[in-house]
Amino acid sequence: MTKNAQQVEVMAVIGLGLIGGSIAKSSYLSGFANHTIGYSLNFSEARLGVELGVVHEAAQTIEQAVSNADLIIIAVPVRAFESILFKVKPFLKKGAVITDVGSVKGCFLEAVRNVFNELPSFVVPGHPIAGSEKNGVLAANENLFKNHKVILTPHEYSAEYPLQLVRNMWQAAGSTVLEMSVAHHDEVLAATSHLPHLIAFSLVDTLAGEEDSQEIFRYAAGGFRDFTRIAASDPVMWHDIFLANQDALLKVLDHFNEDLNSLRAAIENKDSQRLLGVFTRAKVAREHFTKILSGQSYTNIMNTKNVTFKMKPGGSVKGKIRVAGDKSISHRSIMLGALADGVTEVEGFLEGEDSLATLQAFRDMGVVIEGPSEGKVKIYGVGLHGLKQPPGPIYLGNSGTGMRLFTGLLAGQNFDSELTGDESLSKRPMERVAAPLRLMGAQITSSEGGRPPLKIKGGLPLAGIRYDMPMASAQVKSCLILAGMYAKGKTVVSEPAPTRDHTERMLNGFGYIVKREGAVASIKGGGSLTAGKIDVPADISSAAFFMVAASISPGADITLEHVGLNPTRVGIINILKLMGADIVISEQKEVGGEPVGNIRVKYAQLKGIHIPEDQVPLAIDEFPVLFIAAVCAEGETVLTGAEELRVKESDRIQVMADGLAQLGVRTDVRSDGIVIKGSSIKGGVVHSHGDHRIAMSFAVASLRAEGDIQIEDCANVSTSFPNFVELAKKVGMNISVEGFK
C-alpha cells in the first residue's frame, strides 16, 4: 500500500457485530476500502457477512484476516481486547494500522501495552458514539455512523499517518471526528453512556422483582419504555464495560447517588423549590449542552449559518401586530429577579437566543426558574449573595449584552467564573467593561485583544469609583451599576450622551435605589432587591423594522401594539419624524416603570437630514434599518458621531455600505458615520455577516427594490426576533426562507 491516508487496499474487521459490520460495509461502499475481510469467532457469522454484502471475504483464522490488511479494526467486547491482540500481533503486515471501537479507551491501551510492551505509533484508539439495541451481523448498517460523532484518543506516541488514516475512515462513513484524552473520554462516557445503561438495567431488574411486576410492565407508559429501551442491550458487552471502566463509573455513580438521596429528601420534606430546581434544570440541560458543543443558538428556528432570506420586490405593509418582547428588559428581568428576595413573575419575556442564554446562566448558578412558557417566567430569587458557583463556564451564545452585564455582576461574587460564547461573540471586544471593573478591584483576564472567554476571579472586595465613560454605552453603564451593588461605597457613572436606562429603572422598581442627576447615575453598595411582577413591553428595536417598512412602502398603514417608549430608546421615532415620517402614538401608559404605547405608521415621502448627534445614542441599534430609510429619502442623509456602530455584532457601518453597494447604492463611509444619497435599489445578493439587524434591514429594503434580493447568513435573526419572518409575511412582505434544519 502506498502511504495514502485517503483510502486502503485491504481492511480487516475482527468482530462482525453491529459496529464492526457497519463500518466494514460503510468503508467499501464509500470507496475508503477496496477489499474488506471479516473475522468472527463463529465462522458462520463471517460467512453470513459475505452473503449480506457486509464484507467481501470471510476469514476462518485471524492470520487469514490480518496478514495482508493495511488497516485492522478490533470490534470485540472490551475484555477480549488483549487475547485478540495477542493473536493479531504475529501476523501484522509492516505498516499496518490498528484501531478499535470500544467504549473504554483506558482498557484498550492497557491491553495494547501488555501485548506490545509499549504503545506503538500505529495504534489509534477510537470510539464511535452510535449504536442500537440490535446485535450481530444482521444488524450491520452502512448509514449507522452518518451524522454521529466519533472520538479518537491518540496517545503520546501516536504517529500522524495512522491517526489521519483512521480519521479519514470515519469521515468517509459520514461521522464528525473529535479528539480527546483517554482519561477524559472514559470519564465522559461513564457519565453519558455507562451510567444511563447501568440505571436502566437496574431499574428494570428492580421492577421485575416487584410482586405486581406484571401489572407494572403491562401499563408502562411511553416514558418508561423510552428510558428502559437501552436495557435491551447486550448484557455481556455491558458487563465487560462496567468492569473495565470501574473507577470512572464509580465516581459518577457516587455523585448520582448523592443527588438521588437529596431528591428523596426533597420529596419527603415536600421541598417544592428543590424539586422545581432539579426538574427545570433537567428539562433544558440536554439541549443547552448540545448548543454549547455545537456552537449553535439556543433556539431551533434558525440554527444554521446557511439560512437565506429570499425577498421578492414590492409587497405592502398593513395591519396590526405586536412584535417580540424587549430584549434589554427581558435580560434584566431575569438578572434582577434572580438576585431579588422572593418570587418574580415576568410576562412578555422574549424567548430569543440572548434572553434564553441569560436564563440558562442563572439556572447554572442555582436559581430555580419556571418557563418560559408563552412569554411567562417565574423566578425564585436567591438574594444578592445567594448565587452558587456554576459547574463550568457560562455559555452566552451570541449575547454581547449578556456578557458585558454578567461581567459586572460576577465581579462581585465569592466564586471564580468564566464567560464564553459562540464564534461571533468570541470576536467582540470586552475590554471596555473589564478596564473600569479592574479600577474597582476586580481581577479579569481575557484572550488577545480583550476578547472572550473572560475569566473573573471571585472573592475580591470591590470599591466604588467615579467613572467618566469615554463613549456612550448602556452596556458599560449597566455593568458598572451591577458591580456597584457589591462594592463598598458609592459607584458613580457619567456618560457623555444619554443611553438607555432600563437598568436604573428596573433596579428602582425592585427597591434598590439608583440616583440619576443629568448625565450621572450613582448607586451605593450593600442594598437588596425585592421581587415583584414585570410586564415586558414590545421591543422598539424590533418595531423599528416595521416602522421603516411602513414609512417607505406606498399605501402602508400599520399599528404596532404595546411598544416600549423609554425616553432613551425613542431615537428611531425622533429621527423618522425629522425625515417626515407619518407616526402617531396612542394609548400611552406606564407599566412597571416603563412607558408604553401603540405606534401607528403610514407611508410618507421621507427627506434626507443631518441626523442630530444627540439622537445617535437613542437609536444606536436601529441605524441599519435607518440606512434603508435614508436610501428611500429625497436628498442626502448624514450620520456622524456613531463610532459605536463599528463594534456591534459586525461593523455595521461598513457591512451596510457593502450590502448597499451590492444593490447599486453608493455611499460615503466615514470613521464615525456615513453619507447616503437617496437612490433606487437594485436586486442582488448581500451578506449579513451573521448580524441579525443587517439581515432584517435588507429584508425591509426589498419593499422598494427593483429586483429580487437574496440575503445570506441570516441564522442569527432568532437572536433578537424569533418570529420576524412570520410577522413580515403577515403584514404583506414577500419573504421566503431557505436553510432551516
Image (spheres, rainbow, N blue to C red):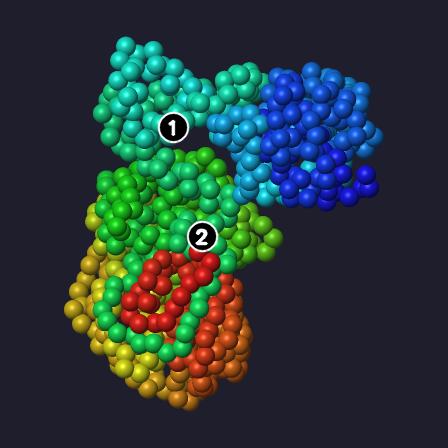
Residue 52 on image: x %, y %: 60, 32
Q: Quadrant of residue 2?
A: top right
User: Which image quarter: residue 218?
Assistant: top left
User: Which residue occupies 35% across, 37% down?
Assistant: 283
Task: Tell me how far mark 2 sits from mark 1, CA to CA.
Answer: 26 Å
Foreground pick, 87 / 265: 87
- In the rendered image, residue 691, in percent from the top left (x then y), is placed at 47, 63
Instruction: Work out which residue is located at the far bottom of the displayed protein and give it.
Output: 635
Mark 1 lies on a secondary structure that is helix
Residue 528 visible here: no
Q: State which quarter of the image contains the N terminus.
A: top right
Residue at screen point 37% across, 40% down: 284
The percent position of residue 113, horizontal first and vertical second, equals 73, 20
Residue occupying image coordinates x 63% and y 18%: 42
User: Which mark identifies residue 227?
Assistant: 1
The amino acid on which the numbered mark 1 sits, given as a three-letter code, is Phe
Q: Is residue 551 visible?
A: yes
Q: What is the crowding at mark 1: few (fewer than 14 residues within 10 Å), some, or many (at least 20)?
A: some
Element under disc 2 = loop
**Residue 655, percent from left and from top:** 52, 70
Q: Residue 714 vs residue 65: left or right?
A: left
Q: Residues within 10 Å of mark 2 (few under 14, many from 20)?
A: few
Left-right relation of 26 to 222: right
**Which of the pair 561/103 is nearer the observer?**
103
Q: Which is more N-terminal, label 1 or label 2?
A: 1
Q: Relative to 512, does residue 541 appear above or below in the rendering?
A: below
Instruction: Identify residue for label 2.
Output: 741
